[in-house]
């Protein structure tokens, strides 16, 4: 079941001199229900732009983007988002923060519906080991605890796809590894569909069942002076379930990390578009005649 589908998507921004600056270049992508996709790429490659398109904060310059076969319009509850900075109201308790979004849409006189949502919120908070902290305010929580609240804020509306933009980037290594394990538990138990952006290649290779590398470092047949936007230069299928953290110590794991670093982050390693590592079963790339004329 396809949740997210990109077809020939470009995104360009106007520049002061009247030209367009191409950020994303002919993007093709399909994400199915239950996939845990991790996304990495060099600075400026367009990872945040890609998330904004999915959220509906921005529109593609050309191409189509659909959520469950419907054109992705303005932001709504089909897409949840967790940022690196905690999106919590400082004057609300943990439980009030989680319920703020759903209760805004449910009239106060629909008590049964509100009670059902509250019970689900308490269940989720218990799952992330915050059941004893529901009456606390954000300033009384550690960074890891605040980020757990932010994740539950996003999950409470049961989004079709959960977008995570560097969610663990501000955490210390020990807390970060705990959060990785916890997120995998949530993903498995609730059959979540996740697109997780990170700058940490080890984190990307450990968490994902599918690894996407977005990069502007590649070549094609459009000429040396052609201004190229980023493409998916790697789309690899990884493991199919949560792994022990001990996998990070294995030689094959470190070999994978270094391979991704070379293919996506080395500006001197310019793969041709026809040589991209797109071995995931759902991966494809529609190239123009100008990009691949042989």
Image (cartoon, grey):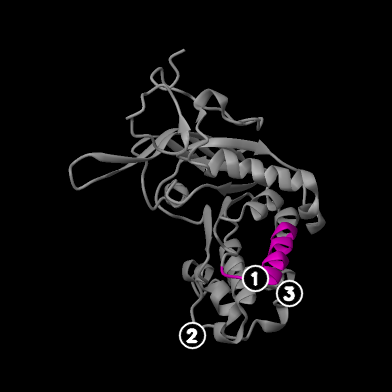
Return the disc, 3 or 1, that comes first in the chain's sequence.
1
Asked whether residue 59 appears in the rendered view, the answer is: yes
Q: Which mark is residue 240?
A: none
Under circle 3, the secondary element is loop
- Residue 239 lies, with reference to residue 74, above or below; the image says above
Asked whether residue 35 appears in the rendered view, the answer is: no
Q: Which residue is mark 2?
A: 91
Return the disc, 1 or 2, that comes first in the chain's sequence.
2
Residue 152 lies in the magenta stretch: no
Q: Crowding near pointer 1: few (<14 within 10 Å), some, many (20+)?
A: many
Q: CA distance from mark 3 to mark 1?
A: 12 Å
**What main secondary structure does the magenta stretch of the protein show?**
helix
Identify the residue at image location x=57%, y=61%: 157
Q: Which residue is mark 3?
A: 129
Please provide percent x and percent y for residue 75: 43, 54
Under circle 1, the secondary element is helix
Under circle 2, the secondary element is loop
Identify the residue at image location x=57%, y=72%: 98
Please provide percent x and percent y for residue 120: 67, 68
């Amino acid at each position: 079941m396809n949740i997210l589908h990109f077809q020939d998507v470009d995104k360009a921004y106007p520049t002061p001199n009247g030209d367009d600056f191409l950020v994303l270049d002919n993007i093709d992508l399909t994400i199915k229900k239950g996939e845990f996709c991790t996304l990495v790429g060099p600075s400026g490659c367009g990872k945040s732009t890609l998330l904004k398109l999915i959220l509906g904060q921005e529109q593609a310059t050309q191409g189509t983007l659909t959520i469950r076969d419907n054109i992705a319009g303005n932001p709504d509850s089909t897409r949840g988002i967790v940022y690196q900075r905690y999106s919590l109201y400082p004057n609300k308790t943990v439980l009030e923060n989680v319920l703020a979004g759903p209760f805004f849409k449910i009239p106060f006189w629909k008590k049964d519906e509100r009670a059902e949502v509250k019970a689900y919120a308490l269940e989720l908070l218990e799952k992330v080991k915050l059941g004893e902290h529901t009456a606390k305010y954000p300033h009384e929580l550690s960074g890891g605890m605040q980020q757990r609240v932010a994740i539950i804020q996003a999950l409470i509306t049961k989004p079709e796809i959960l977008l995570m933009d560097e969610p663990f980037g501000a955490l210390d290594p020990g807390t970060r590894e705990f959060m990785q394990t916890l997120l995998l538990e949530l993903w498995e138990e609730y059959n979540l569909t996740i697109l997780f952006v990170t700058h940490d290649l080890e984190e990307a290779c450990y968490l994902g069942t599918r690894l996407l590398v977005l990069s502007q470092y590649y070549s094609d047949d459009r000429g040396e002076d052609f201004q190229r936007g980023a493409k998916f230069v790697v789309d690899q299928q990884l493991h199919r379930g949560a792994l022990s953290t001990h996998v990070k110590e294995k030689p094959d794991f470190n070999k994978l990390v270094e391979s991704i670093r070379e293919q996506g982050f080395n500006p001197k390693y310019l793969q041709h578009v026809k040589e991209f590592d797109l071995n995931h079963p759902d991966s494809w790339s529609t190239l123009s005649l100008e990009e691949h004329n042989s």
